[in-house]
Image (tube, rainbow, N blue to C red):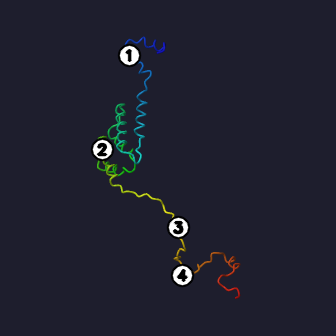
């Protein structure tokens, strides 16, 4: 310790009073720690494809940390936030949980989520992944519009009458 700090603590008589004074001066306030823990808890989202068990353990550790800091949240709030942190593939589970009005502890909820994850993976069909073919058709494509009706002309000309007078007529012999 430097001389100035040592002189400040020389006036204090016993170790608990020195520790209390040091805690007051150098400790980070609980409010900041509680803010960081709450932000981490409410901001945690499970990414699709990761284990729900590891996500549940992470959320459970954040819940225990918030309870140690006396954040003032109840069990229902913890469960709602955990359910909201799940990816969209867990929407059927969330609907079922809310529709049945289940009241479970956080540990029971995590166990139910692990069972649901096992059910999802068991029922997922296998997906075949392959390359796209570069097949090119050869030859003429048959025209479905051939025939008498396809040759009929539209009732109105596509060009203005002045332009039609300037164009040679098709289908006539040159000598006529």
In percent of width and height, residue 25 lies at 44, 21
In percent of width and height, residue 171 lies at 64, 83
Q: In this rendering, which labeled residue sits more in front, label 4 or label 3? A: 3
Q: In the image, which disc is placed on residue 111?
A: 2
Separation (CA) of disc 4 from disc 1: 106 Å
Separation (CA) of disc 4 from disc 3: 27 Å
Q: In this rendering, which labeled residue sits more in front, label 4 or label 1? A: 4
Query: Against 27, is 41 above or below?
Result: below
Q: Nearer the viewer, residue 51 or 42?
A: 51
Count of picture labels = 4
Mark 1 or 2 closer to N-term? Answer: 1
SS for dot 4: loop
In percent of width and height, residue 138 lies at 54, 71
Mark 3 or 1 closer to N-term? Answer: 1
**Residue at left offset 40%, top offset 57%:** 127
Task: Determine which residue is flagged by label 1.
Answer: 17
Query: Against 148, is 82 above or below?
Result: above
Q: In this rendering, which labeled residue sits more in front, label 3 or label 1? A: 3
Task: Determine which residue is flagged by label 3.
Answer: 136
Task: Determine which residue is flagged by label 4.
Answer: 147
Residue 116 relative to residue 142: left or right: left
Mark 2 or 4 closer to N-term? Answer: 2
Separation (CA) of disc 1 from disc 2: 47 Å
SS for dot 1: helix
Mark 4, other Cα within 10 Å: few <14 / some 14–19 / many ≥20: few
Q: In this rendering, which labeled residue sits more in front, label 3 or label 2? A: 3
**Residue at left offset 34%, top offset 42%:** 79
Separation (CA) of disc 3 from disc 2: 53 Å
Residue 107 relative to residue 85: left or right: left
């Amino acid at each position: 310790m430097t001389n100035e700090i040592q002189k400040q603590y020389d006036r204090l008589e016993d170790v608990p009073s020195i520790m209390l004074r040091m805690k007051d001066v150098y400790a980070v306030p609980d409010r900041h720690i509680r803010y960081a823990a709450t932000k981490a808890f409410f901001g945690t989202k499970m990414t699709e494809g990761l284990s729900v068990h590891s996500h549940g353990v992470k959320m459970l550790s954040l819940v225990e940390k918030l309870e140690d800091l006396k954040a003032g949240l109840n069990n229902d709030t913890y469960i709602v936030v955990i359910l909201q942190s799940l990816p969209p593939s867990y929407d059927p589970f969330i609907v079922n949980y809310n529709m049945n009005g289940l009241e479970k502890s956080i540990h029971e909820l995590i166990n139910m989520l692990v069972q649901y994850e096992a059910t999802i993976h068991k029922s997922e069909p296998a997906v075949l992944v392959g390359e796209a073919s570069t097949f090119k058709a050869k030859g003429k494509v048959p025209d479905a519009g051939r025939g008498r009706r396809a040759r009929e002309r539209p009732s109105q000309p596509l060009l203005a009458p002045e332009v039609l007078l300037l164009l040679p007529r098709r289908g006539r012999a040159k000598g006529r």
